Every structure is written in C-alpha cells, then in structure tokens.
Amino acid sequence: MPFQNPEETGHVHVIESYVTRTYSGLPRYLVLNSGHFLSPRWRHATRFTRHLIADAAAITDAELQALLGYEWRARLTAAWLIGVGRRDRFRTRIADLLLASEVSHSGTAYCFALARFGTHADAEILTAYLDRYLPRTDLPYDQPAALGALLRLDTRLGTHHATRYTAPDGLWHPWSRATADLGHPTHTPADLHHWTNLNCDFANGWSPRKNRD
C-alpha cells in the first residue's frame, strides 16, 4: 500500500493535532505504544485520557484516512482513535493494514480496534492474521496482540477461535518458542488476554460527556 504524506492531501495539521501532541514531553503515539497511560503513577493520565476521547469523537473520517495512509506513528494513533470511538466503518481498512503488516508497532493498535468493535467479523480478521503469520516463526510481528484480542472476543462472543492456536499442538507454542530463541519476550495466552482487557477496559471507562477540562 503506498504511503502518502498528509500534507499532500490537504491535511497538514493532523500529525501535530493528533499524533505528536505531548504530555510531559512524551508524544501521544509513544504514550499509546508504551501503555504508559495505564500506570496509576503517571500524573498526566486523566488529561491524556480526556484529550484522547475528545479527539476520537472530533476527528473526521477524512483525517483518519490521511493518518492511515502515512507512516507507523500516524497509523498507530489513527487505529487507537478508531478503536476508542468504535468507528467500525473502518473495519475493512484496518483488516487490510493488519494483514499487510507493512510497518512495525501499528499492528497492536489495529488489534485493539478490532477487539473494541467486538463482533464475529473482527474475530474472523484476527484468525486470518494468525493463520497467515503464526506459521512464520521467523517473524515476530503482532501475533501476541492478535491472540490477545481474539481471546477477548472469544470470551465476549462465547466462541472458541483461539483454542486451535493455544492447544498443546497449536501454532502458538512453536511460534512463541522460536521467537524467544530470537531474543523476543515470551507471553502466555493469559497474559495477552489480560493486556487486551486492560486496554479495552481503559477505553470503556470513559465517555465523551466526561471529557471536560
């Protein structure tokens, strides 16, 4: 998929407005990517959350498209705003970007958005991703985030899509062992499920009407 600078589409403001806005010197995309906002010791968490929810409600579809067409920081931020606002009309675009896996980091945000949408269609996208990338034991991409999101959807939907990956003979275990040998951290499925729940419950705990400074 071709990359396009938002300046070329008349959206020169979107990076500064939505992606690099800072909190105690940390740009928004970095706070989202690190999960820093989940720390109860971070004194900027309330202000960060209010601004995030407000922007998720205010950003236009055209601005989101401009961000999704750019590099990983813009895509990560756009996917978070889409997920927080549950703009499921972006489902197909998110699916295409996740399956293409063109850039690093942003895939975790795509998985967050799909977990927030919370439907069978989203579970199908996540299984398609895992079917494609878990056999690739040489690629430590966003398999953990995808499995965590799928486990959350299974719990909510009463399905068992993740079982075939997490079973003793499933694809998760050889992939996890192989990537650990490459020096990447290991995660249990329970850990991944918990982390997805933390992110989604964070988004569930606020509403636009709480968004007043």
Image (cartoon, grey):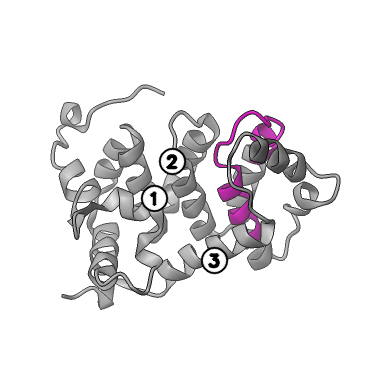
For badge 1, the amino acid type reads: Asn
Segment tinted magenta in the rendering: 130-151
What's under tag 3, amino acid-wise?
Asn
Question: Which residue position holds label 2?
Answer: 105
Q: Is residue 42 visible?
A: yes
**For mark 1, does the 10 Å Cα neighbourhood hold few (<14), some (14 to 19), or many (20 or more) residues?**
some
In the image, taking residue 109 as reference, residue 23 lies left or right, namely left
Q: Does residue 24 sit above or below 30 in this rendering?
A: below
Q: Residue 213 location, x and y as percent?
A: 16, 75
Please, what secondary structure does the residue beneath circle 2 have? loop
**Secondary structure category for the residue under label 3:** helix
Q: Which mark is residue 33?
A: 1
Left/right of residue 212 with respect to residue 165 in the rendered view: left
User: Mark 2 or 1 closer to N-term?
Assistant: 1
Residue 211 vertical position relative to residue 139 in the rendered view, above or below: below
Of the two numbered discs 2 and 3 on the same chain, state the one appearing first in sequence: 2
The N terminus lies in which quarter of the figure? top left
Q: CA distance from mark 1 to mark 3?
A: 16 Å
The residue closer to the viewer here, 108 or 2, is 108
x, y percent for residue 8? 18, 26
Residue 72 lies in quadrant: top left
For disc 2, the neighbor class at 10 Å (few under 14, some 14 to 19, many from 20) is some
Q: Quadrant of residue 62?
A: top left
Which of the two residues, 175 or 164, is positioned nearer the viewer here? 175
- Mark whose residue sits in front, 2 or 3: 2
Which-is-in-front pick, marks 1 and 3? 1
Looking at the image, which residue is at 56% across and 49% down? Answer: 145
Give percent across and percent down for residue 100: 51, 29
Q: Do we see residue 85 in this rendering?
A: no
Q: Which mark is residue 197?
A: 3
Gap in Å between the C-alphas at discs 2 and 3?
Answer: 19 Å
Whether tag 2 and tag 1 are in contact, CB under 8 A, the answer is yes
